[in-house]
Image (tube, grey):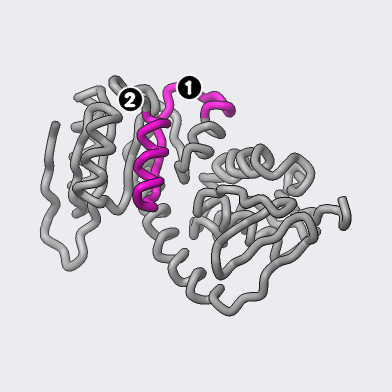
Amino acid sequence: MLNTTARQQTAPRTVLVVEDEPTLATAIAQRITAEGWTARVAGDGASAVQAAAQLKPDLVIMDIMLPVMDGLEATKRIVAARPVPVLILTARDDEADKVTGLGAGADDYMTKPFSMRELIARCKALLRRVERAKVIAKNAENEKILDFGSLVIDPAQRTVSVDGDYVHLTPTEFDLLATLARKPKSVLTREKLLEEVWDWVDASGTRTVDSHVKALRHKLGPDMIRTVHGVGYAFEPPAQGR
């Protein structure tokens, strides 16, 4: 277990790094510290769950392949105990792995090897998204329920139901679905979705959008989000009385 302390700030960010490869874990922790944040490292999934409960981090960087408890199970337990953005690290560029990770509660992913510059950029984007989500949630308190018959989205309560059954979505999945559903049948580019949901100002995360759409389709069915090849996605309301 490694601990590093950030430079003093008015409101320092705390990042939990879960990685069993000591060299990589140290490199990530040092880069995080250089940003003025506080880093804490856990070497296995079980230790990560315990550390998250004690530390209450602002962000978790989670490797999938871990001893004792894998990263997917650790992510599920951490997010279930307390909502926190999770960035998963995977050694395989496999879409199924990414969708599984997002389904476990992660908000974004990166494939090894990766640059530290890109890692920090993703971390900053996730932290901005958390702050943005608070504003969105406040603004949604008086927003009307989006009722599409078999699909009902409640922005104020942040709930989604299909045929009367509630469907668990991660915070990012909910924000993505609600953003699309507010403009039924309208095509939103990947870049626009990155800006609206993730608060990203460039197109470096377009594959993240694709993976989150796949995760939503897995939970809600394949027909509610239409792909417009080369452009983006559109929400297709379910047929009434289906």
Q: Secondary structure at mark 1?
A: loop
Q: Nearer the viewer, residue 18 or 142?
A: 142
Q: Nearer the viewer, mark 1 or mark 2?
A: 2
- Magenta part of the chain: 71-97
Please state if 230 lies on the left or on the right of 44 as rendered.
Answer: right
Measuring from the top left, give residue 88's x and y in whole percent: 41, 36
Q: Are marks 1 and 2 in contact (CB under 8 Å)?
A: no
Q: Quadrant of residue 187?
A: bottom right
In this view, 130 is above or below 77 = below
Q: Would you say residue 153 sits in the magenta stretch?
A: no
Could you say which quadrant of the image residue 61 lies in?
top left
**Residue shown at 52%/52% (left/top)?**
172
Query: Which SS class for mark 2?
Result: loop
| Residue that label 2 marks | 69
Res 117 visible? no
Q: Is residue 9 left or right of residue 62?
A: left
- Quarter of the picture containing the N terminus is top left
The residue beneath circle 1 is 92
